[in-house]
Amino acid sequence: MKMHPRLRGLIPATHTPFRADGALNLDVVEKQAAHLLANKVHRAFIGGTTGESASLTLEERRRLAVRWFEVARGTSLEIIVHVGSNCVTDAVDLAAQAQSLGARGIAALAPSYFKPRSIDLLIACCAEIASGAPETPFYYYDIPVMTGIHLPMADFMVQAAERIPTLCGLKFSNPDLMTFQLCVQACGGRFDVPYGSDESILAALVLGGTSAVGSTYNFAAPIYHRLWAAFERGDLAAARVEQFRSAEMIQLLSGYGFMGAAKALMTMLGVDVGPARLPNGNLRPEQVAELRGRLESMGYFDWIR
């Protein structure tokens, strides 16, 4: 397989834009991409949890990917496509499409209705999916709080390295920092382990993390740019200030239902990604006004300037 440079820095997990009636609104992707680039972000992770992939049809996922690559063409934006599905055959199809479009990488959740109950079965699922894109870096997407799959990820990486030629790492959406360390050090530290809990990214950096995939990088990238820069210059006091701002913001959004609140916040910033699809909920107009007021009071709009 062609060698690829390791992932570095922030990788926003982007929202899938919908119209008020719930239909895809792919015209908004151009604004999403421009917003990321304006905030000095040059990679996007599309069709993941934040992208409500489990609420999209296969055809909608294919159309979403095509649109992102159309918009990214000629820019510095690289696209990583989440292709995981409860139907492994669909995941293989999406992986093949992502490779044909020129994806920087693919990632896949495990099937989570019929769950792989062992590392061996999980590797078998991932190997099948990765075979659809044999020239594209593959990342397993571990998010046990959503999938209900709790397997030792460092062991997975060691064993999968022998069976998945394109394995480049693990999207680690798990607050377990002991397991994160084990994954970062697995196989002599050869794999990328993008961290997926924005509210504790500073801890991941201290423990050797070099990249992060998260939803809040869509609307708060300046906070994390400052955090990362402070960490790199050894100013942990300044980095902790930014990390606490992240935690305050996430706690506030979570109180309204994170997905609906985050999409409402994107609209406040001029990128109207529309409502969330069921079974996620959305904010009522009075809640949107209240959220804006609370964000203003905490200083959020100053933090992201």
Image (spheres, grey):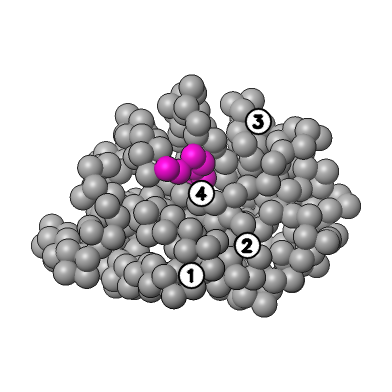
* Mark earlier in primary sequence (2, 4): 4
Which amino acid, by three-letter code, is at mark 4?
Ile
From the viewer's perspective, tell me whether residue 213 is left or right of residue 19.
right
Which amino acid, by three-letter code, is at mark 1?
Asp
Disc 4 crowd rating (10 Å Cα; few below 14, some 14-19, many 20+) is: many
Task: Using the numbered discs, state the Cα–Cα distance from disc 1 to disc 4 in whole angstroms.
Answer: 23 Å
* Mark earlier in primary sequence (3, 4): 4
Residue nearest the viewer, comparing 249 with 140: 249
Task: Using the numbered discs, state the Cα–Cα distance from disc 3 to disc 1 in whole angstroms.
Answer: 40 Å
Q: Which residue is label 3 attached to?
A: 99
* Mark earlier in primary sequence (3, 1): 3
* Mark earlier in primary sequence (1, 4): 4
Residue 115 % position (x, y): 67, 63
Segment colored magenta: 40-48
Residue 123, compared with residue 176, is above or below; it is: above
Q: Which residue is label 1 attached to?
A: 235
Q: For the point 54% across and 35% down, which residue is it?
A: 78
Q: For the point 62% across and 36% down, which residue is it?
A: 104
From the viewer's perspective, tell me whether residue 56 is left or right of residue 166.
left
Q: Which of pointers 3 and 1 indicates the residue nearer the eye?
A: 1
Residue 171, compared with residue 25, is above or below; it is: below
Q: Which residue is label 2 attached to?
A: 209
Q: Describe the element under mark 2 as helix, strand or loop.
A: loop
